[in-house]
Image: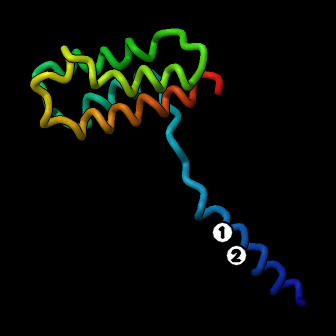
Amino acid sequence: MSRIALFCLALALLLAAGCGASQRQTWTLESVRGDCMTDRMCFDNQDEICQAYVDLLSKPYASAHECRLACESFPQREEIFVGNLGCKGFFEDTTDTCVEYCDDHFPH
């Protein structure tokens, strides 16, 4: 095989490998809050709900699993969820962000 053919094959393999890799955002408390505030404006008290997520993530968890459990149970808190049934998508998106934060910042 000629050098040009080998070069083209190597380049094609590198490009193919790069296409499958996606960059996932590394979340900070500030970016979690910002994403929460711009996600869906569902409630009059969205600022308070977003701050509650940040407060939840500010706690010292022993593991990512423990943190994820807190994220997943957060929308079921009665005082938050009552009256906000139309905002299920907001809670799903924000919980996903919360879980990603846990995976980035706590031991597995």
Question: In this picture, is 92 found above or below 78?
Answer: below
Q: Nearer the viewer, residue 68 or 20?
A: 68
Looking at the rendered structure, the kind of residue marked 2 is Ala
Relative image position of residue 6 (x, y in whole percent) = 84, 81
Question: In this picture, is 3 found above or below 83?
Answer: below
Left of 6 or right of it: where is 65? Answer: left
Residue at figure coordinates x 40%, y 28% from the top left: 31
Looking at the rendered structure, the kind of residue marked 1 is Leu
For label 1, the crowd category at 10 Å Cα-Cα, with few meaning under 14, some 14 to 19 and many 20 or more, is few
Callout 2 secondary element: helix
Q: Quadrant of the N terminus?
A: bottom right
Q: Nearer the viewer, residue 32 or 15?
A: 32
Left of 82 or right of it: where is 53? Answer: right
Residue at figure coordinates x 36%, y 23% from the top left: 73
Relative image position of residue 4 (x, y in whole percent) = 82, 85
Label ID, residue 12: 2
Callout 1 secondary element: helix
